[in-house]
Image (tube, rainbow, N blue to C red):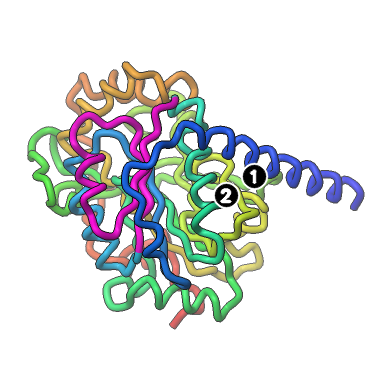
Amino acid sequence: MILGAWTSYRLRIQRKRWHIRARRKSRELTVHKDRTNQIKRGDILLFSTFRNEDVRLPYFFKYYRDLGVDHFIMVDNESDDGGGEYAAMQPDVSVWTAKGSYRRSRFGVDWLNYLQRKYADGHWTLVVDPDEFFVYPFCDTRPIRALTDWLDASDIRSFGAMLLDMYPKGRLDAVPYKKGQDPIEIASWFDSGNYTFAKNHLYYNLWIQGGPRARMFFEDEPWRAPALNKTPLIKWDKNYAYVSSTHMVLPRGLNLVYDEWGGEKASGILLHAKFLDTFGEKAAEELSRGQHYASSQEYKAYAEGIAQHPDLWCKWSEKYINWRQLEILGLMSKGNWA
């Protein structure tokens, strides 16, 4: 009991340090277009960082508007492809420009922690990248507010989602992606199995790895494959803080988005449309910048693998249909939400 109390105390101190760090890193943020005065009580907010994602942003905004997001708060890390200007033109988007190091901002977490602390208190908040598309139970017939209303009524503050890497059948550069297109029209396949799960006993989150990146780019060292567990949807409080992307959050009780007692908690999926024809150029850019985790080892693996023109499709690949298919496969669950 004493050990548990000491651990909780250390994590509270850590969370305060993240808040102090986020406030310091906020000096790197410059307002490009601030429409936060439009945010109303109860609005559902989306936060995201991006760099050179102009080709993806039109569909990204459309997808989340259709789900029911009310306002977007975006951090543009020095794009030079016009994406920052495009985002700033949108009537429901506020944009900050970040001129600091993505790596030294803990990969954008410090910037978003600051903005969430300032604008998201009391709001349901979704944190996703421009290549991530949130899928939840009944998303084809119910807006995201139906989900957050149910979570509120159930006194649930956080909602987990596994990152599901999507890919085309054939070479990644075989079909060009067009601006405004649904990327899942091209990257429509995924691994239905091939996942490992381990509990993090400090933060309480499940650490999930596997899928096409593990079997193709990290075949010899699968433990280095990217984490697929995320907690992207949270009823935000100004005292909360993300620790590592959306993989871990404090207080750690927010990471308990799974059931350990034989039942199933409702959960979702983030369709990850990274593997398009744009991936090779993007990977080369990020490798040269060296702004990613562990000296960009992930992008080094991508660069080496892409040179072989890989086909991520295999005989166990499944073509995406809808959320019900993902539930049948055990990748997400509607829990007791009916």
Q: Which residues are magenta?
A: 71-100
Residue at 28% across, 26% down: 283
* Front-lying residue, 317 or 269: 269
Q: Could you say where residue 252 lies in the image, as x and y percent from the top left?
A: 66, 52
Q: Which residue is mark 1?
A: 200
Residue 219 visible (yes or no):
no
Badge 2: few (under 14), some or many (20 or more) residues near its Cα, within 10 Å?
A: many
Q: Which residue is mark 2?
A: 206
**Direction from residue 27 to residue 214 in the image, left or right:** left
Residue type beneath disc 2: Leu
Q: Could you say where residue 31 lies in the image, as x and y percent from the top left?
A: 38, 42
Pointers 1 and 2 in contact (CB under 8 A)? yes
**Direction from residue 216 to residue 295 in the image, left or right:** right
Reading the chain from its start, which is encountered first: label 1 or label 2?
1
Give the secondary structure at mark 1: loop
The quadrant in which residue 297 appears is: top left
Residue at 62% across, 47% down: 199
